[in-house]
Amino acid sequence: MSSPNVETALRFVKAVEQGATGSTLMEFCHPDVSQHEYPNRLFPNGAHRDAQALRASSERGQQVLSSQRYEVRNAVAAGDHVALEIDWTGTLAIALGNKPAGSTLHAMIGQFITFRDGRIASIRNYDCYDPF
């Protein structure tokens, strides 16, 4: 079942996949947007980002990845909440840990998005990376 919030969430994910940064990315987001990334292989202590940090993170990502693909497996909406199950693959532009540039990373992602006024107000990521 589709909803306006699911459609916005899917467009947001597609924009991230295509490398959107700055104002293009932030068009999807409420001015008070926040992201909480729970601990994972890349961020062992997790990360919390406000709008400014989210924008900066998207720009840093452009330097780390040469490409990425988000395959949304499931999308569920309940009111102002959307849950996405995502199969993610990224190709490294630089070496990361024991992975040389050109290597592929893979993660299964649970992403939970809350909307306010039709825009993304919060994102909670549970990124489960394959070992590397």
Image (cartoon, rainbow, N blue to C red):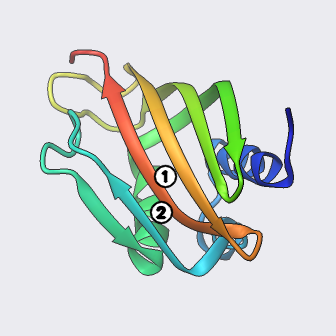
Mark 2 surroundings within 10 Å by alpha-carbon count, few (fewer than 14), some (14 through 19), many (20 or more): some
Mark 2–mark 1 contact, CB under 8 Å?
yes
Using the rendered view, name the quadrant where residue 56 is placed: bottom left
Q: Say what secondary structure mark 2 lies in.
A: helix
| Quarter occupied by the N terminus | top right
Query: What residue is rendered at 26% in x and 33% in y?
Result: 95
Mark 2 residue type: Glu
Residue on which disc 1 sits? 62
**29 or 96: which is nearer to us?**
29
**59 or 44: which is nearer to us?**
44
Residue on which disc 2 sits? 59
- Expressed as whole percent of the image width and height from the top left, the position of residue 83 reads 59, 40
| Quarter occupied by the C terminus | top left
Examine the rendered structure and indicate whether residue 69 appears above or below residue 93.
above
Query: What residue is rendered at 20% in x and 46% in y?
Result: 43
Examine the rendered structure and indicate whether residue 64 appears above or below residue 76.
below
Mark 1 residue type: Gln
Using the rendered view, name the quadrant where residue 42 is placed: top left
Q: Say what secondary structure mark 1 lies in.
A: helix
- Expressed as whole percent of the image width and height from the top left, the position of residue 7 reads 82, 47
- Expressed as whole percent of the image width and height from the top left, the position of residue 68 reads 56, 33
Mark 1 surroundings within 10 Å by alpha-carbon count, few (fewer than 14), some (14 through 19), many (20 or more): some
Query: What residue is rendered at 64% in x and 46% in y?
Result: 82
| Circle count | 2
Q: Mark number for residue 39?
A: none
